Amino acid sequence: MFNTSLRRNPVAAASVLILLMKVFSGHTLTCQRAEYQIGNECCPMCPPGSRVKTDCTEIRSTSCLPCTKGTFMNQPTGLKLCFSCAHCGKDSGLKIKRSCTFISDTVCEPLEGFYCIDSTGDRCEAALKHKQCQPGQYISQKGTASTDTVCSDCSEGTFSNGTFESCRPHTQCDSVNLQLIKAGTASTDAECGEHSSTLMTGIVIGVIVFMLMIGTSAYLMYYLKKKERTRNAENHAEEVQQMTALRSEAGPASSALGGLSLINCTQAMFSLHEL
């Protein structure tokens, strides 16, 4: 019945056909790769580094604006806002590898001593600090920007404080002519010391040297005093001889006075010598 009425009314049939075409055309509209769809229109996209200001219409094309500082657009777009640049925060263990531009995002990489735990392409989104090996362990594999440090335990007879790249053997005290004071552990070396006999020998030698120094000093003081007494005696004898010669030259008249003077001088000399 519906088909019969359409055949009898060509105008109505045309209207229905146009309506159906619009409905189906709206569902089957396909834009090109460099276009974006707004309603029933395909608008040209804005180039990388820019964004849409106003959409196109039947009479004008799309208008674009450059991205603002701190934003970017890395592909042709129909969006009205650019993307925000990524932040490489130290709290995330990151630093800037390549700075953000209007056409590319910031590229982050791990800080020194960190490794990436979340990445997209060549971008690192988050990083953790490398593991620190404990005393008794050594670094069997150093950490990189993409892998953590690997630690391994020291074997018997070796030690590491946690920073060594290989465990070190304990010192053999006997090989260096010392005695063992404290045995080594997985984290510390053996402690060595002097043998008891060696230590006693050193003490005895020290005492002997000290006594020799004292004896030498005492002898030197005695020698100097003795030499001084000898020199004083020689000077006294020489003075007596000189006084005797003077008395002989003065004659008998002055003998008594000269003798008295000689005695007084001699007593004075002995007094000075005793002092």
Image (spheres, helix red, strand yellow):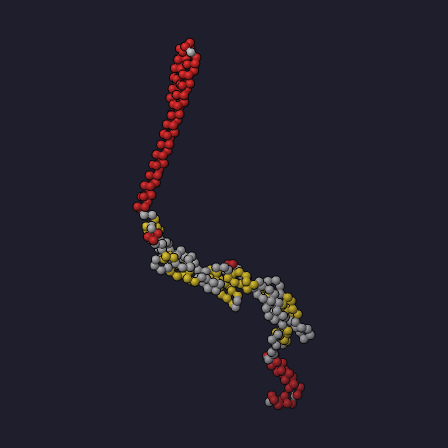
Camera-side residue: 40 or 1?
Answer: 40
Q: Which residue is drawn at 45% across and 60% down?
A: 130
Q: Do we see residue 68 in this rendering?
A: yes
Q: How many labels does the image show?
A: 0
Q: Position of residue 255 (x, y in %)?
A: 40, 11
Is 100 placed left or right of 152 in the picture?
A: right
On-image quarter of the C terminus: top left
Q: Which residue is drawn at 46% across and 64% down?
A: 147
Q: Which quadrant of the view contains residue 19? A: bottom right
Camera-side residue: 85 or 4?
Answer: 85
Instruction: Indicate whether 22 appears above or below 162.
Output: below
Instruction: Indicate whether 81 appears above or below 199.
Output: below
Q: Position of residue 126 (x, y in %)?
A: 50, 63
Is 65 placed left or right of 169 in the picture?
A: right
Residue placed farthest to the left in the image?
197
On-image quarter of the N terminus: bottom right
Q: Do we see residue 86 in this rendering?
A: no
Q: Position of residue 70 (x, y in %)?
A: 59, 62
Is 100 placed left or right of 220 in the picture?
A: right
Q: Which residue is drawn at 47% across and 63% down?
A: 144
